[in-house]
Structure formats: structure tokens, C-alpha cells
Image: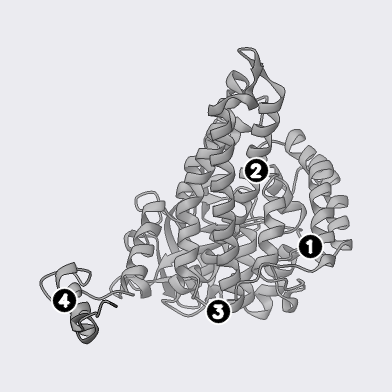
Amino acid sequence: MLDFTIEPEFQEKLDWMATFVREEVEPLDLLFPHGGDPYDVGNDQARAILRPLQEEVRTRELWACHLGPELGGPGYGQVKLAYMNEILGRSYWAPTVFGTAAPDTGNAEILAMFGTPEQKERYLQPLLDGEIVSCFSMTEPQAGADPKEFVCRAWRDGDAWVIDGEKWFSSNARYAAFFIVMAVTDPDAAPQSRMSMFVVPAETPGIEILRNVSTMDERDELDEGIHGYVRYDQIRVPLDAMLGGPGEGFRVAQARLGGGRVHHAMRTVGQCARAFDMMCERALSRRTQGTLLADKQAVQSFIADSWIELQQYRLLVLHTAWIIDTQPHGAARTQIAMCKVAMARIYHDIVQRSLHIHGSLGTTNELPLARMWMAVPLLALADGPTEVHRTTIAKQLLKRYRPAAGLFPSEHLPPRREAARRRYEEILSRSTEVPA
């Protein structure tokens, strides 16, 4: 039975979070709007404001809630995380304030599952404490996110692994204390067994950030972005730098990507809700042609369609979270892909309507809508292109079906009609006596 209910005590936590994010966290978005600000541990002004907020979150026992009790988290489960992330999604800084910022969350999970005790002490604990940030370095300039086309190599040389190649869109590379790097260790193996994963300290000789790339919703000044184009020039790391076994890089990556995708979806619900709130406020505030925008049928359609789409998507995300909580590992693969496919489209449609209702003001940097609009293409590509996930959904769904047994479809009406007649032939053949 589907159950999305939560206890009154947890609802109180959600109510506190909503007020706290609105009043205390959203101002950080205005004071420090650069994409890398939440990850720049060297920004003393931002950190002076951030640390007391993080301490308040810890006091409320809401820090790093994506983690299980074994890692110091409350182990709330994905349904409760969905409700929480809806609130956190309204602010760019909120995940950092609450200890749930990507890619650090996924990297922490990798280290927890595959790291050595020494790696956990050196990297995992400071990451969980919010003292450092990290980088997940997987995609490549010639291959994008397709691991079958990766060429960054790693080979063993005595008591070390040597990594050589380039990586593209390695988020937060400029601020990271360490990188988790995927490299090809067996080019002749099957695609899912070609790669291995390594943890690499940022100070390792031979790491060169060729440039820091900014996205459409970030500053466009040269080298001001947070997505690193990185060159690993035959860097050397010890043998125990490998996370998991040789050839297990794909499995290690999948252990983090599923959770990251559904958390993106949860936060997108919050972003859409914020755009929807702005739409409704504008409709009730602005007049044209003698009446409020809210009185116009077209605007009413915008509001109705947006609310229907948002509620449908929210239920899909909650259902996915419920499956993760209650079913065996991997059971939610199709649902996670569904969330990913629908995410950018829902976000696009609701933000576009809200922007349109705000008129020229909506296109300016004086409202959050412009930045939301520019983030739409990124959502369609982050954690794998939408098209890839559509293929995943179709393949998984088609496994439930079989080809038709004969020349015509199983729903072909003539043979079904004949079968129905044969089934009730005796009843149909009886003569009905008409009373005198």
C-alpha cells in the first residue's frame, strides 16, 4: 500500500525548515549569487554567515539527512527526504546549509561504501562535517557521459596507479580537496568492466585545470565558472587509491547516480513551486485591459495547467521515493529515469508560464525567473541526457511484454469476439419464451 504520510513531529521540522530557508537562507542567494560561492571554502565572508546557520541545522538534528545512522545521519528514508528537498530546492544555498550539496553527497556515499578506513578519516569525515568540498570527475570532452567512449587511462606502475587523460565538466574542481576520477583500466574488457574509480588528492602533482567553464545561469567572465576542464598528466596515486575493485568503476558510479537523480527531482519540485507561487502572486497583483490578470481565461489556464503538472510530478517523485524505501535495491530504476525525463519539461513549462505572466520584468535579473529559465537545459543534461533515460524506461517497460502469438495483435477483435461467443454459446442458443 502506498503511504506518503509523515508524523506530526516531522511536520513540525518541515514547518521550521520552510521558515528558516525563506528568512535565513534565501538572503545568501542574494548576497553571494555566483555559482561557486557555496563551495568556496576560502570565502571568509560567506563562511562567517554560513557556519552559524549550519550549527542551527545541526542543533535541530537536520544536518546531512540523506545519510544513514551509521554515518551520523538520522536515516529518514527517501519519502521524508522528498518533503525536505522540496523546501531546500527553493534556495541555491540551502543544500550547503543543510549538508546535502551535490556532488559531495554522492561522493560521501562512494567513500562510505568503498573507501578504506584511512580514506574515510582523511576525506569522508571532513566532507560530512562541511569542512571541505569534493569533485566527481567522470565525463570527457570527446565523450560526454558515454563511458564506452572514455579514453582517460589508468595503469599500474610498481606501487602506484598512473592516470593520464582529460575530464570535462568536473564540477567544483577549483575548490575541491579531492577528486573521484573514473579511468579506463582494461580497454579490452566489456564496457561495464573497462573502468575503475580512484580517489585523488587535489594537491597531486600533474593535475591541471585547463579552464573553469561557466554555464548559462552563471557569470560569463572568463574562467569564472565552477565546472573544470581538467588534465591529469600521468599523475601517480597509491594502489589503495582505487575505490572498489579493478573494473568496478561503472558499478561504483551507479551506486551514487541514482540517488543524485532523484534528489535533483525532489529539489526541482521546490523550484517549480516557487515559480508557481510567483505566478499566482503576479496574477492577483497586476491589472491589464481593465481587470486583474487573474480574471483572464488564459492566465487561469496557465495556473491550472501548472498546478496539475506540478502535483502529477510531485506524486511521481514521492512514489519513486517510496519504492526506494520499501523495495529491494534497484527496484526504482525505471521510476528514477521517469523522474529524470519529466524533470526538465515540467520545470520548463511552469517557469515559462510564470515568466510570461511577469512580462518584461520576468526576463530581467531582477527576478529569480531568469536564472531558473537558464537552468532548464542543464537539468535536461545533468546526470545523463534525457534521451538516454527515455531509452532506459522503454527497455525496462518492454521487458514486461511478449510478441503477439499469431499474425494479428492479441487485441484483434474478430477472434476475441468468436471466443466470447463460444464461451457463452449455450446461453446464447437458448430460445427465450415470451410469456402469454
First in sequence, mark 3 or 1: give its number. 1
Q: Which residue is mark 4?
A: 418
SS of the residue at dot 2? loop
Residue type at mark 3: give it. Gln
Identify the residue at image location x=46%, y=59%: 338
Residue 298, given in percent of the width and then of the height, sits at 53, 28
Asked whether disc 3 touches disc 4, contact meaning CB atoms under 8 Å apart, the reply is no
Residue type at mark 2: give it. Gly
Query: Residue 341: which quarter of the image?
Result: bottom left
Asked whether disc 1 touches disc 4, contact meaning CB atoms under 8 Å apart, the reply is no
Query: Residue 6: which quarter of the image?
Result: bottom right
Q: Which residue is mark 3?
A: 327
Q: CA distance from mark 4 to mark 2?
A: 69 Å
Q: CA distance from mark 3 to mark 1?
A: 26 Å
Query: Residue 16: which quarter of the image?
Result: bottom right
First in sequence, mark 1 or 4: give its number. 1
Identify the residue at image location x=71%, y=31%: 281
Q: CA distance from mark 1 to mark 4?
A: 65 Å
First in sequence, mark 2 or 1: give its number. 2
The disc label shown at residue 284, or none: none
Q: Which residue is mark 1?
A: 63
In this view, the mark in front (1 or 4): 4
Residue type at mark 4: give it. Glu
Q: Considering only vertical position in the picture, is 60 above or below 293?
A: below
In this view, the mark in front (2 or 3): 3
Identify the residue at image location x=79%, y=69%: 7
Q: Considering only vertical position in the picture, is 212 above or below 190?
A: above
Q: Is residue 380 left or right of residue 418?
A: right
